[in-house]
Image (cartoon, helix red, strand yellow):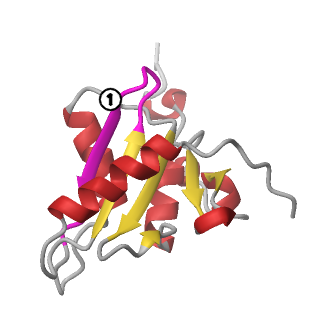
């Protein structure tokens, strides 16, 4: 499968790296994420690790962006603490990112191999969450008049 690559947003990678370096302390916060909004803002977040399965940085980023009035993101990247660099989204995050932001681009790879790909390219042959929802006209009871 050929994947179209987009230019890498190095400012976004740097923003996530800065947050990872400054805010990721201890075992509870080990990943940082940064996302660019359509108007150019950069929003950042960190994960909330818990043995029961806390949210990854990418999922916290979606909520943080929404809390700041940004319901769309163009590009996201996740970076590990301790200078681990760019870390690709886990399977759960790939599915959630695809469901909530289907046009999203994700920065993946390392060093000179950094690249930006569509979230759909990271989850080929994926389940489409909207397929389980009824169409609007199916939710209205038929008129009996």
The question of residue 7 being in magenta is answered with: no
58 lies left or right of 4: left
The question of residue 43 being in magenta is answered with: yes
55 lies left or right of 132: left
The quadrant holding residue 35 is: top left
User: Of 24 and 72, which appears nearest the observer?
Assistant: 24
Asked which secondary structure carries label 1, the reply is loop
At which x and y percent is residue 128? 60, 54
At which x and y percent is residue 88? 52, 68
Give the residue pinned by disc 1: 70
Residue that appears at 54% across and 35% down: 135
Residue that appears at 30% across and 60% down: 32
Residue that appears at 51% across and 36% down: 74
Q: Among all residues in the image, which is located at the extreme right?
A: 2
Q: Which residues are magenta?
A: 36-48
Q: Is residue 22 above or below residue 53?
A: above
58 lies left or right of 25: right
User: Of 26 and 74, which appears nearest the observer?
Assistant: 26
At which x and y percent is residue 9? 54, 42
At which x and y percent is residue 99? 50, 50
Q: Is residue 119 above or below residue 53?
A: above
Q: Among all residues in the image, which is located at the extreme bottom?
A: 51
């Amino acid at each position: 499968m050929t994947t179209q690559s987009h230019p890498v947003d190095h400012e976004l990678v740097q923003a996530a790296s800065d947050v990872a370096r400054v805010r990721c302390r201890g075992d509870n916060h080990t990943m940082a994420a940064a996302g660019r909004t359509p108007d150019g803002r950069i929003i950042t977040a960190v994960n909330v690790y818990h043995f029961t399965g806390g949210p990854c940085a990418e999922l916290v980023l979606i909520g943080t962006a929404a809390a700041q009035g940004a319901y769309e993101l163009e590009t996201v990247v996740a970076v590990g603490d301790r200078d681990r660099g760019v870390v690709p989204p886990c399977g759960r995050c790939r599915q959630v990112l695809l469901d909530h932001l289907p046009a999203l681009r994700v920065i993946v790879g390392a060093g000179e191999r950094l690249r930006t790909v569509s979230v759909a390219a990271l989850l080929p042959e994926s389940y489409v969450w909207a397929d389980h929802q009824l169409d609007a006209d199916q939710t209205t009871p038929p008129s009996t008049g």
